[in-house]
Image: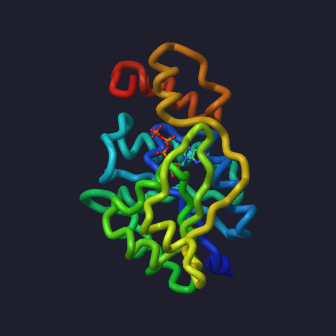
Amino acid sequence: MMPAPPQRLGLLGGTFDPIHCGHIHAARVAQRELGLDQVHMIVAARPGHRHPPEATPEQRLAMLELACAGEQHLIADPIELNRPGKSYAADTVACIKGQYPDAELFWILGEDAYDTLTEWHRWAQLISLCHMIVLQRPGYSGCEPAALTALREAPDHTQIAKLSEAMLDLSATQIRDALRLGRAVDHWLNPAVAAYIDEQKLYVNQEDSL
Ligand code: ATP
């Protein structure tokens, strides 16, 4: 018998350059707090709004697959690798809505990413298709765009919710920088991901984020 399609589906997009314990913790917490059937972890193959990642889309997907392998509710989703051009979340969510027409969709993101949301391609369309679930980012203090505050505080708003659960103080930038300096990063990564980085000699040469 085919498994029942998910009714409540989380989507956590990222460059995952590399995927780290902060991402996995965020996905686990959102899954549990919102009662999600699954969380799709979506590699931004060619992100539109930031500097290009160091690892290739295929390498970042391989690391994501390793990190999700033992996770009951997390799925490494290659959807953006299969689409040419820039990876826009609005296109991805529209596509997933087509695959799961009856599911309620929840886009999960850190507050640093949320604060840039009104710069994303067709952001209004994006939030018309899914709820936005905003997670704290320790050490981050930014500013919510006025347009989003207004939406979030509207009496009948359903699209935007902030979760108060503690997150890990960790970023991929921190990991890339530590690797370049030859420091240990094992406590921040799934062991299989750490081994893959080592084997592929990732994040040792370039100095863009130092
Ligand atoms: P970088 O340092 O390269 O910018 P990052 O660690 O922020 O990377 P991304 O892949 O850009 O990782 O993040 C994907 C999503 O996960 C974003 O919405 C981001 O806010 C969120 N995120 C990343 N790290 C954490 C964390 N430690 N806690 C909560 N959310 C996080």
Above/below status of 197 relative to 142: above
Task: Please name whichever residue, 119 or 207, is drawn nearer the observer in this view of the structure.
Answer: 119
Above/below status of 80 relative to 179: below
- Quadrant of residue 103 in the image? bottom right
Question: What x and y, as percent, mark residue 60?
Answer: 44, 43
Q: Residue at x 60, y 24 (%)?
A: 185
Question: What x and y, as percent, mark residue 118?
Answer: 38, 62
Question: What x and y, as percent, mark residue 135?
Answer: 61, 54
Q: In the picture, which quadrant includes the C terminus? A: top left
Task: Please name whichever residue, 23 or 163, is drawn nearer the observer in this view of the structure.
Answer: 163
Q: Residue at x 38, y 76 (%)?
A: 125
Is 12 left, or right, of 59 in this rendering? Answer: right
Question: What x and y, as percent, mark residue 21?
Answer: 64, 40
Q: In the picture, which quadrant includes the N terminus? A: bottom right
Residue extending furthest toward the top? 182
> How is this picture coloured?
rainbow
Q: Residue at x 31, y 62 (%)?
A: 83
